[in-house]
Image: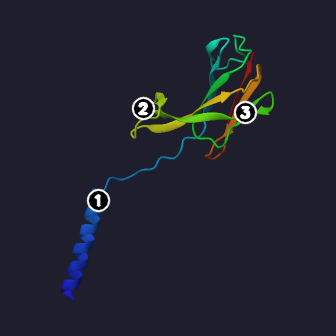
Amino acid sequence: MVGIKRNIVRASGLFFALLASVPAVMAESAPPLSNVQVLKVQSAACGIENISAGQERTTCDHGGTNIKVYVLEMGYGRTPTVQLDGFNLDGMQTKVCAYDNGNPTECSGASMKIVGTLYIFDLGGKQEGTFSFSNRSINAPGNTVSTQLYIK
């Protein structure tokens, strides 16, 4: 009986020693949506126009075809609502990561943390109008962020 107890104690001790040597994996919660901004508008007529925070309309007349809009969303959202003059738009997306110093960059390594999403929308032949983007956070309290820009 003493031998059985001793083996159980040894096995338990070995298990806890192994468990203690495994690094703890701490899952961070997804950051809530905090900001969304149109970064740039690209077209054949104007090239790339950088858009400032709070800018309400493009300065260049992008009229024509192949207009693209780049939107940066910080935090984790659900499915965004994206429209030009009330018509839904589809786009591509890629995750945005951050270095340890917090500067956003393209995700390329395991040591980086995802902090947001970059969206690229093609206006599909539409030449001008009010572009609007809104999304709801996946985290409580489920805040909504939005932006709009008049593209001429």
Residue at the left extreme? 3
Residue annotated with mark 1? 20
* Colour scheme in use: rainbow
Could you say whether the residue bearing mark 2 is in a helix, strand or loop? loop
> In the rendered structure, which amino acid carries the disc numbered 2?
Tyr
In the foreground, 50 or 63: 63
Residue 94 located left or right of residue 108: right
Q: Is residue 140 above or below residue 42?
A: below
Q: Residue at x 24, y 69 (%)?
A: 13
Q: Position of residue 7 (x, y in %)?
A: 21, 79
Q: Position of residue 101 (x, y in %)?
A: 41, 29
Q: Is residue 14 above or below residue 70?
A: below
Residue annotated with mark 3? 89
Q: Looking at the image, is mark 1 or mark 3 earlier in the sequence?
A: 1
Residue 99, disc: 2
Q: Residue at x 65, y 24 (%)?
A: 69
In the foreground, 96 or 21: 96
Could you say whether the residue bearing mark 3 is in a helix, strand or loop? loop
The quarter of the picture where the C terminus appears is top right
Q: How many angstroms separate mark 3 from mark 2 (CA)?
A: 31 Å
Number of other residues with Cα within 10 Å of mark 2, as a class: few under 14, some 14 to 19, many 20 or more:
some
Q: Quadrant of residue 73?
A: top right
Residue at the right extreme? 86
Q: Position of residue 123 (x, y in %)?
A: 71, 26
Q: Position of residue 50 (x, y in %)?
A: 61, 16
Residue contact between numbered discs 2 and 1, judged by CB atoms under 8 Å:
no
Q: Quadrant of residue 19?
A: bottom left
Q: Quadrant of residue 33?
A: top right
